Image (cartoon, rainbow, N blue to C red):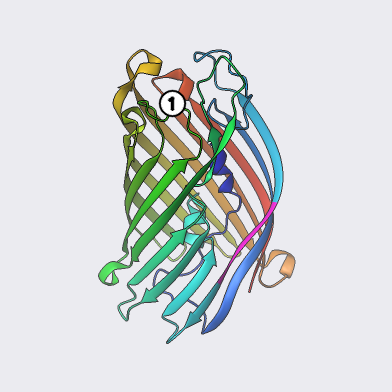
Amino acid sequence: MKARYSLLIALLSSTSCYAKLGAGNGFSGEISLNSVYVTQESNLSTDADANLANLGQPSQTTDSFIVAPLGNIAYTFGQSNQQVYFGTTRDDIAVGTLAVQLGYKYQFSSKMTIDIAYLPTVMSGSVWQNPYDTESTRQETDVDGNAYRLKLSNIAGSLFSVDMAYGDKEIEQDSLQGSDLARDADTYFIKGQVRLPLSRATMLAPAISYTKQEAEGSASSFERYRGELSVFQFLGAHQIALTASYSQTDYEAESTRFSGQTRSDNGLSLFAAYEYVDFLGYKNWSLISFLGYDQSDANIDFYDESQTIVSLGINYQF
């Protein structure tokens, strides 16, 4: 779950679904400074104790506090209908998803937008060489990988969008290589979402997604189905986004490591983001905060995980 540390800021999307890509041609962006407290329970996290007593032990609890700057920059050109950008996107952050992206957007006269991006950090991170080692101290290794994204927004001028992605990852020193739990994998993702304005100040955004991971080990391969509902509320200078989701993950094959059991996970995620724009009367400055909670309940206790993240920060938009 260490990769989830990327959920560091919460900036709500205050623009209309039909807005231009930028206020005008030229550079724009934002930068924020965030204080973040994270607590998690996980046997797989490299922040957990490197010494594992047995595979039946409860998930280990760790916590940490960090201060981190984040932001994005974009350049809009043409008839304000083309844009290149680098950083994080407000739409993603508002629902609890954050990833650094290098991308290009093109908006048609119908307001339909094509967004193509490269995500260099999504698949990268660190894991244990052998997370199940109970005989010696577990050692870390790096995960290398790349991810690519294609998003179609306001399709045919509607409020419907489709988000598609592909990623690959490779464990540098995977002690499980050649076993049914080998972790090198290709991952495919698709998500459909529709935005439903209830009033000028309230909007719903239900979504469903499907993820398929094809790993070298059959017991590490899975299919995941996820349902999500977001509520956006705009109250003058105060903007709030609430997101709840539930997922079901079914693994492809049984694992010899766990007496022939086939892993299955149920996931629950709750996320609340808040922005106070023009904070204390300072134009373009915002107070930002969020609270996120993720829980994964597996039929194999070793894989049970949970994480809580609390963040408070200041954002400047230019």
**Residue occupied by mark 1:** 297
- Place of residue 103 in the rendered image (x, y in percent of width and height, measured from the top left): 45, 67
Amino acid type of the residue that numbered disc 1 sits on in the rendered structure: Asp
**Magenta stretch: dominant secondary structure:** strand
Extreme left residue here?
156
- Is residue 20 something that shows in the picture? no
Numbered disc total = 1
In this rendered view, identify the residue nearer to me: 131 or 207: 131
Compared across the picture, whether 67 is left or right of 112 comes to right
Q: Is residue 222 above or below residue 264?
A: below
Q: Residue at 54% x, 73% y: name it.
A: 74
Q: Nearer the viewer, residue 42 or 214?
A: 214
Instruction: Tell me, yes or no, if residue 168 can be seen here.
Output: yes
285 shown above or below 51:
below
In this view of the protein, which residue sits in the foreground, 240 or 91? 91
| In this picture, residue 38 sits left or right of residue 306 | right
Q: Which residues are magenta?
A: 68-73
Q: Is residue 175 above or below residue 311?
A: above
Please state the horizontal and vertical placement of residue 191, each as a whole percent of the image. 33, 52
Depth check, front residue: 153 or 171: 171
**Image side of residue 299 versus residue 279, left or right:** left
10 Å neighbourhood of mark 1: few (<14), some, or many (≥20)? some
Q: Relative to 82, does residue 256 appear above or below in the rendering?
A: above
Q: Residue at x 47, y 51 (%)?
A: 95
Q: Is residue 48 magenta?
A: no
Secondary structure state at the residue bearing disc 1: strand
Q: Position of residue 282 (x, y in %)?
A: 72, 70
Q: Residue at x 45, y 83 (%)?
A: 80
In the rendered image, residue 71, in percent from the top left (x then y), is placed at: 61, 62
